[in-house]
Image (spheres, rainbow, N blue to C red):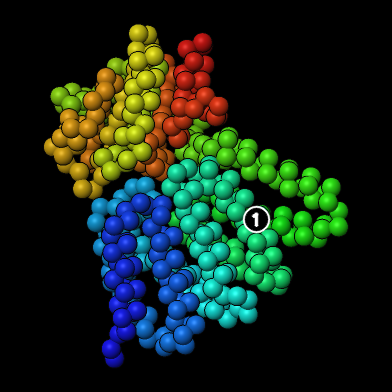
């Protein structure tokens, strides 16, 4: 069976786009979009389901990408069964959305364009900022149903068709247990729910205005402060250690000298855990260095950036990365490759901050936060310890 030019183009472009598009947050959306649009083409043109094999190169690429050192960041658990499960959830979600949309009696082309726009806005928000995505996703799913109702179809189920692809996309968040993204997962449904309420209150303009105003303020608050506070709170709760936990550790400096709790007795200790594969860690090092410079003159506080080795690391490669990419004044420590501080300190992702009081007890364990307007700010935690 010969493939049409269109099918070759879809397969080639999808693979090329996947290879060129390396952003971890965007990758699932790109896959969902490919499957969604290709499913529309198959169903609208009444093509056979056997043509699905043209996405085989994308499948092979997904396995290659996620099985070669992709050990932190987007997928916390790189085991093959989870990688394959994630991929097929996205594939089935895309095809289900495309199939049902192709059977919709509304203006399919215009509705498809609107769905693609909402998906693009959703993923652009994820790339720039999850807090921004919280607001933009909420607003777009408040406005998009009205546009669909006004210009495409007046069927009451149209808003649900609009929100379905994004909700299906967010299945991967549930699959990877990304509870920190829960508000981002639910806000499209909330926005569509508000739309339905506003629609029901169409004869009461004052109530409509009040409801939209309150919900918009909620979305803006989520962007400015609320969503970031929630995620920071979640990271702290997930990393919570038993009460009065005293940290036990053996680290090494670049020269190979041992660093243990005994040398830190009577000092506040700040550990910033990082890995060589963590781009966010490198972007936040200037902030960590700023805080280090602020308190460096005090004799009773110590700062360290602690490298946690990943599977592909060697001591030589870590030292080379430090020499080539970390030109800051704070001291750097290395964890032994046989240690499991991820489990011991409940580290779910990096950068991860742990602060010990002068007795060596863990007083903070969780995500790093340098923004003054947010909870668990690193400087606030340090200042409170210094006052004691």
Left or right: 359 in relation to 208: left
User: In the picture, which quadrant includes the N terminus?
Assistant: bottom left
Residue visible at 58% across and 34% down in the picture: 225
Left or right: 288 in relation to 185: left
Q: Where is residue 293 in the image (x, y as percent from the top left)?
A: 35, 15
Residue visible at 73% across and 43% down in the picture: 213
**In this view, 307 is above or below 137:** above
The residue nearer to you, when weighing 87 against 325, is 325
Q: Position of residue 377 (x, y in %)?
A: 50, 26
Residue visible at 30% across and 77% down in the picture: 8
Q: Which residue lies furthest to the right in this view?
A: 204
Tag 1 secondary structure: helix
The residue nearer to you, when weighing 194 against 86, is 194
**In this view, 388 is above or below 247:** above
Q: In which quarter of the image is residue 284?
A: top left
Left or right: 353 in relation to 136: left
């Amino acid at each position: 069976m010969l493939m049409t030019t269109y099918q070759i183009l879809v397969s080639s472009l999808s693979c090329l786009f996947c290879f060129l598009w390396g952003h971890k947050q965007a990758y699932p959306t790109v896959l969902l979009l490919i499957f969604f649009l290709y499913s529309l083409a198959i169903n609208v043109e009444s093509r056979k389901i056997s043509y699905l094999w043209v996405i085989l190169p994308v499948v092979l690429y997904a396995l290659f990408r996620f099985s070669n050192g992709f050990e932190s960041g987007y997928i916390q658990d790189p085991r093959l069964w989870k990688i394959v499960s994630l991929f097929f959830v996205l594939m089935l979600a895309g095809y289900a959305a495309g199939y049902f949309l192709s059977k919709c009696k509304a203006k399919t082309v215009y509705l498809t364009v609107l769905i693609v726009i909402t998906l693009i806005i959703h993923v652009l928000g994820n790339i720039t900022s999850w807090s921004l995505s919280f607001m933009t996703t909420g607003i777009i799913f408040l406005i998009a149903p009205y546009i669909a109702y006004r210009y495409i179809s007046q069927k009451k189920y149209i808003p649900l068709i609009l929100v379905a692809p994004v909700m299906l996309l967010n299945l991967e968040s549930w699959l990877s247990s990304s509870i920190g993204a829960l508000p981002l997962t639910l806000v499209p449904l909330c926005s569509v729910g508000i739309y339905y309420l506003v629609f029901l209150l169409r004869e009461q303009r004052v109530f409509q205005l009040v409801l939209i105003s309150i919900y918009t303020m909620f979305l803006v608050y989520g962007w400015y402060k609320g969503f970031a506070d929630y995620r920071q709170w979640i990271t702290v709760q997930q990393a919570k250690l038993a009460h009065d936990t005293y940290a036990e550790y053996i680290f090494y400096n670049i020269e190979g000298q041992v660093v243990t709790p005994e040398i830190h007795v009577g000092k506040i200790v700040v550990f910033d855990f990082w890995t060589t594969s963590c781009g966010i860690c490198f972007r936040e090092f200037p902030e960590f260095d700023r805080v280090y410079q602020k308190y460096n003159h005090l004799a009773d506080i110590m700062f360290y950036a602690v490298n946690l080795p990943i599977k592909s690391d060697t001591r030589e490669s870590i030292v080379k990365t430090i020499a080539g990419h970390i030109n800051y004044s704070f001291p750097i420590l290395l964890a032994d490759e046989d240690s499991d501080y991820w489990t011991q300190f409940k580290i779910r992702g990096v950068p991860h901050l742990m602060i010990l009081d002068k007795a060596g007890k863990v007083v903070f364990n969780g995500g790093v936060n340098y923004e003054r307007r947010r909870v668990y700010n690193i400087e606030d935690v340090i200042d409170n310890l210094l006052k004691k």
